[in-house]
Structure formats: structure tokens, C-alpha cells
Amino acid sequence: MTDLANVPAQAITGRVFTVFVLAFVIIFVTARLLGKERKELWFKRRTNYTLLNRRGIFGEYMNFGYPRTWKGLLVALAMYGIIFAIAIGYICFYPYA
């Protein structure tokens, strides 16, 4: 593990932003691979929207909702696990130049 006390804050911030972008890519690719039909079968979306929680076109496409089946739970856990593993590996273990 890299000692983060000696790493510049800009380098850590850059990696955190990179992880955020990769997280969006993982969610977008998963939504694309599952398709609309399986997302509707495996996940339950919010039904009542207010002014404060309304989303745009990409937000609705990437919105999975709550898992309603075991397949949905596996997909959600896999996404969270991949994002977590990439974040910890890239921020803490990948060497800083």
C-alpha cells in the first residue's frame, strides 16, 4: 500500500475524479448490456417524482432503482464491487509517479 501522507493532494484528487468517471462508465455499460427489459424485470424504479429528484435523459437511462430479484441483487453487488475494487486499487495500491 502506498503511503498517502507523502503524495500531493492534486494527485489524489485527480485519481478520485478518474474513479468517478470510471464508475459512470461501468454503470452506463451495465445498463447497456442489460437492456431495458431486464432492468425493468430485475429492478424497481421510483414511481413518484418531485421537482427535487427529477433526472435528465442520462440519469433515467443509468437509473437502476432497487433490486427486486436475486439477479438484480447480483448485478448491483457486482457493480458496487467492481467500482470499489477499482477505487481502492487505483487510489491506494497503484504507485504514484
Image (cartoon, grey):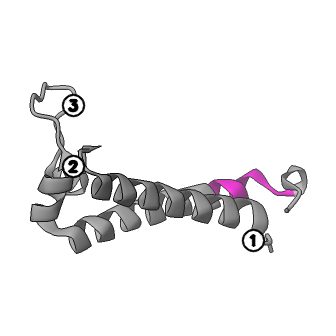
Q: Residues within 10 Å of mark 2 (few under 14, many from 20)?
A: many
**SS class of the residue under badge 3?**
loop
Residue 42, located in which quarter of the rendered image?
A: bottom left
**SS class of the residue under badge 1?**
loop
2 relative position to 28: left or right? right
- Looking at the image, is mark 3 or mark 2 earlier in the sequence? 2
The amino acid type of the residue labelled 1 equals Tyr
31 relative position to 56: left or right? right
Q: Are marks 1 and 2 in contact (CB under 8 Å)?
A: no
Report the span colored magenta.
Answer: 7-14
**SS class of the residue under badge 2?**
strand
Q: Which mark is residue 53?
A: 3
- Which residue is most to the front? 70
Q: Is residue 86 magenta?
A: no
> Residue drawn at (57%, 56%), measured in percent from left and top?
84
- Residue marked by disc 1: 94
- Residue marked by disc 2: 43
Q: Are marks 1 and 3 in contact (CB under 8 Å)?
A: no
What separation in Å lies between label 1 and label 3 (alpha carbons)? Answer: 36 Å
Name above or below for residue 52 compared with residue 28. above
The amino acid type of the residue labelled 3 equals Asn
List x then y, in percent, for residue 30.
Answer: 31, 67
What separation in Å lies between label 1 and label 2 (alpha carbons)? Answer: 34 Å
What separation in Å lies between label 3 and label 2 (alpha carbons)? Answer: 18 Å
The amino acid type of the residue labelled 2 equals Phe
64 relative position to 24: left or right? left
Quadrant of the drawing holding the C terminus: bottom right
Q: Are marks 3 and 2 in contact (CB under 8 Å)?
A: no
> Residue drawn at (14%, 26%), measured in percent from left and top?
51
Q: Residues within 10 Å of mark 1 (few under 14, many from 20)?
A: few
List x then y, in percent, for residue 33.
Answer: 24, 74
